[in-house]
Image: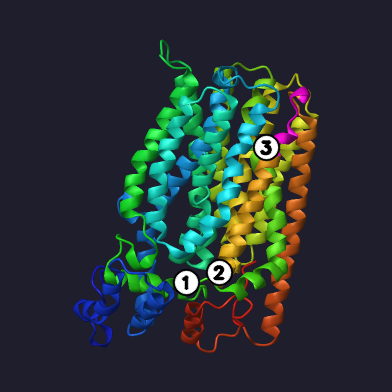
Amino acid sequence: MSKEIDEAPTDHGVGTADIEKSQHGFFARLGGQRVDLNELGKEYFQQSLQYDEEQLKRDSIKVRRKLDFIVLPIYTADRQMMTTYMLSFLDKQTLNYSNAYGLQKDTHMHGNDYSWVSSALYFGWLTGAYPWQILLQRFPIGRLVGVMLFVWGTVCMLQAAVFNFAGFFAIRFFLGLLEAVISPAFIILTSMLWTRDEQSLRTSYWLSVNGVSSIVGALLAYGAGHVESLAIPQWKLIYLIVGAITFAWGIVVFLYLPDGPHNARMLSEYEKIVAVWRIAHNQTGLKHDVIVRGQIKEALLDPKSWLLFLMAICYGILNGGVANFMSAIIAGFGYSPLKTSLLQTPVGGIELVMVIALGYLSKLPNSLGLTIVVGCLPGLAGLIGILKIPLTHRFALVGMCWLQGVLGSPVVLNWTLPGVNTAGHTKRATVLGIYFVIYCAGNIAGPHLFLASESPRYPTAIKGLAGSYGAAIGLQIIYTTYCWLENRSKAKKGLLDVIDATEEAMEGFEDLTDKQNKHFRYRI
């Protein structure tokens, strides 16, 4: 039987007191001074070598469960990430929901003004995507995200004070600028807390709450539609509620979201050692705050990077179109604003179930690329249905809209690829930064495929989105094949044979890129 995890095992005569004493020197360096997390991780890993490997394996399961869900929900990294991401998506969706309650009329929008307001958030995200990567590499992730949430909640509430197109565009721009930190921060944090085999499922967990957000947002909009005798329009009430919740949640994130395993409050000192031992074999280390110019060059010359960038624009176009025009499509089938809000709730349920289900599928050996391709098929089928089913079959058309909820799965699983298949912290930051810049550009372009004169089917947009699905599938097949060929080439040379597991794990803390680390295996 394994010992309780809150007590360090005493293999080799080493107990909790010995650990705290031996670690005192480098734990003291956490007190406000900049710490090289790779060096810190290396010291944690060296501490782990004094314990029996079988004991570490048993205790690593307990640590993983603790990171996932054992302690109080607000005190776990996974739940904090899920709640924060839910609020992020809810904020994006508020524009979609408020549109059903006179937003365009009250703000004097005409023609394609609404499409430009939809794109404004992604103009801000595009502007902030790469600068946030630099800040994330140099500053603690938890504190950075916590401060951002305070400002973000305030700006969200300010949307209730605008009265014209220009003001709304400006507010949405700054919201995008702030929210640009969320996705890359969580991808980096996920890579620091979970193993490579676990990351796609954990990323699916925190993106699956988009489904919860869709349900909550639709019900919130439905409830706001029934509130009468307000001093403000109903659509403004939605922004005030969401902004206030976000501001309050910022306190929790600032206090409790860890920057990595080294300062995760839910873990004891011994558990932190086990947590680092767990992720040591990712061969990606923790975090290195020095910008290495050679890694930027390698990122730009790596064919895998460009395949990711091309996929980013495909998913950006899909997300920008689907997220902002779902209500307009359903309303175009002849439903009232209240009914339109209510009919969007199943989209959230479908997304919640399918994102998690496909996340589990991606855990199977050599199944990540295949799962992304499978995740694209329901949405593609739904788009064809919207284009071909007669308008008299209104509920069938709404069902085709619901299938778009599956889009969240291939999007988030594609996001994990730079995290699991790109080593070297500057290289990974560069790939992620450019990836999200291009993803934002796609989100800007997506809404403009919807031409007001083509309501309710929007054939130009539907064909464009279907083409984006097709391109994403083709590019994913090429990317997976490329990684498979790289792994096969290394295997033939014997580079993937584990000769010294400890030495290979230590290489991960040397900030080597996936090209420099000859033992690095790509996940396919």
Q: Main secondary structure of the magenta part?
A: helix
Q: Residues within 10 Å of mark 3 (few under 14, many from 20)?
A: many
Give, as a three-letter code, the residue at label 1.
His
Give, as a three-letter code, the residue at label 2.
Thr
Residue at image position (74%, 67%) is 481
Is 134 rendered above or below residue 89? below
- Magenta region includes residue 453: yes
Determine contact: label 2, label 3, CB under 8 Å: no
Mark 1–mark 2 Cα distance, whole angstroms, equals: 8 Å
Q: Earlier in the sequence, mark 3 or mark 1?
A: 1
165 or 50, which lies in front?
165
Q: Which residue is mark 1?
A: 288
Q: Earlier in the sequence, mark 1 or mark 2?
A: 1
Q: Quadrant of the N terminus?
A: bottom left
446 sits to left or right of 358:
right
Magenta part of the chain: 446-454
Q: Which residue is mark 3?
A: 321
502 or 299, which lies in front?
299
Q: Secondary structure at mark 2?
A: helix
Q: Earlier in the sequence, mark 2 or mark 3?
A: 3
Give, as a three-letter code, the residue at label 3.
Gly
Residue at image position (24%, 84%) is 14
Is 142 rendered above or below residue 489? above
